[in-house]
Image (cartoon, rainbow, N blue to C red):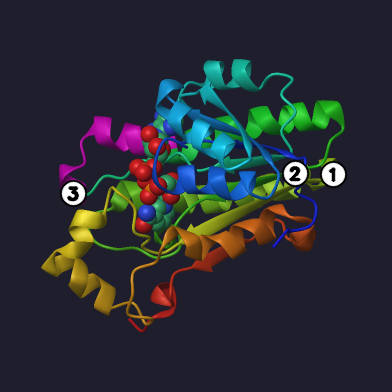
């Protein structure tokens, strides 16, 4: 199915070397979007770009560490992206008392400040060129609710949800939409082992749909937010979690 307003557009996907970022890059390329797949090391996304080309899509690799504000500004200066998927993220799982300063910095610098750097640089280029655009910040249900041992992560994602609203209000005048995607637990390489464990299985039983989300579950919500079908959506968050965040406390 072809979603309106995507064919021929250009998109940047950060953190595209694995998991959801790689999935989003392929998803957009299949819609005729020219994708720039960004990772800290460009060689890590080279295979993804080759796979996208073999599937008939167009993709190029970009070296980008989202925590490096100067490098982000330089990489996006004059860039002509219509769509930005702020997907790069890191997690830390430990009691708050065991979150040392380096861990807190790593999580906030990547998930909140990194997304801010990328959004600002991309929006500046869009506004300078007078082009409309759309930014999707990949947050989490942990930006809306809390769970044990993920204090920095939850705070970073809550900040990202609030940043989404603030940027949407400021940038509506430039015809730039900004929304947050809030997934629940989605199976990717980093958590597959955990969800196969007893603790992981117990967690899945607390999700009303009683199953772990798959990357494909995010396809419709992501494409809605970036396509013309979502043209009035800005400053909002889409929760995709099998009912997890709505579950009774
Ligand atoms: P992942 O670890 O496979 O993907 C994260 C990507 O971000 C990796 O490719 C990593 O290299 C990249 N990255 C980290 N720091 C970076 C930096 N400084 N600059 C550039 N890239 C950097 O995990 P994932 O599950 O695919 O997560 C993708 C996004 O989705 C993250 O923001 C995560 O918080 C969010 N999310 C995931 C889940 C889930 O259950 N998988 C649920 C909710 C939200």
Q: Which of 236 and 101 is in front in this view?
A: 236
Q: Does the magenta stretch include residue 104?
A: yes
To which residue does mark 3 refer? 94
Q: Residue at x 22, y 49 (%)?
A: 93
User: Is 80 positioned to the left or the right of 91 in the image?
Assistant: right
Q: Does the magenta stretch include residue 185?
A: no
Which label's residue is closer to the chain start, 3 or 1? 3
Classify 88 as above or below 195.
above
Quadrant for ligand 1?
A: top left
Q: Position of residue 223 (x, y in %)?
A: 65, 57
Residue 216 seen in the figure: yes
- The quarter of the picture where residue 11 lies is top right
Which label's residue is closer to the chain start, 3 or 2? 3
Q: What stretch is highlighted in magenta?
A: 96-110
Do the residues bearing badges 1 and 2 touch, measured as CB atoms within 8 Å? yes
Distance of mark 3 from mark 1, alpha carbons? Answer: 41 Å
Name the main secondary structure of what is drawn in magenta. helix
To which residue does mark 2 refer? 170
- The quarter of the picture where residue 225 lies is bottom right
Q: Where is residue 10 in the image (x, y as percent from the top left)?
A: 71, 36
Residue 109 seen in the figure: no
Pick out the residue farthest to the left: 198
Q: Residue at x 28, y 48 (%)?
A: 190
Quarter of the image containing the N terminus?
bottom right
Quarter of the image containing the C terminus?
bottom left
Q: Residue at x 34, y 69 (%)?
A: 212
- Secondary structure of the residue carrying tag 2 is helix
User: Is 145 positioned to the left or the right of 102 in the image?
Assistant: right
To which residue does mark 1 refer? 173
Distance of mark 1 from mark 2, alpha carbons? Answer: 7 Å
Distance of mark 3 from mark 2, alpha carbons? Answer: 36 Å
């Amino acid at each position: 199915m072809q979603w309106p307003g995507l064919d021929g557009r250009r998109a940047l996907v950060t953190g595209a070397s694995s998991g959801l970022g790689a999935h989003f890059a392929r998803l957009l390329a299949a819609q005729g979007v020219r994708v720039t797949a960004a990772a800290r090391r460009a060689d890590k996304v080279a295979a993804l770009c080759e796979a996208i080309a073999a599937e008939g899509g167009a993709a190029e690799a970009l070296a980008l560490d989202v925590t490096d504000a100067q490098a982000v500004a330089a990489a996006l200066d004059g860039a002509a992206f219509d769509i930005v998927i702020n997907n790069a993220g890191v997690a830390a799982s430990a009691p708050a008392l065991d979150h040392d300063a380096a861990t807190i910095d790593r999580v906030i610098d990547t998930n909140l400040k990194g997304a801010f750097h990328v959004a600002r640089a991309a929006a500046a280029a869009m506004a300078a060129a007078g082009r409309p655009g759309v930014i999707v910040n990949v947050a989490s249900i942990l930006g809306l609710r809390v769970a044990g041992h993920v204090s920095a992560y939850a705070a970073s994602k809550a900040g990202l949800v609030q940043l989404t609203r603030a940027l949407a209000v400021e940038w509506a005048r430039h015809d730039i939409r900004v929304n947050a995607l809030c997934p629940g637990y989605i199976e990717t390489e980093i958590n597959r082992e955990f969800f196969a464990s007893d603790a992981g299985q117990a967690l899945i039983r607390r999700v009303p749909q009683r199953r772990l989300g798959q990357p494909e579950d995010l396809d419709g919500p992501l494409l809605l937010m970036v396509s013309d079908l979502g043209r009035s959506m800005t400053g909002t968050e889409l929760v995709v979690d099998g009912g997890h965040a709505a579950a009774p406390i």
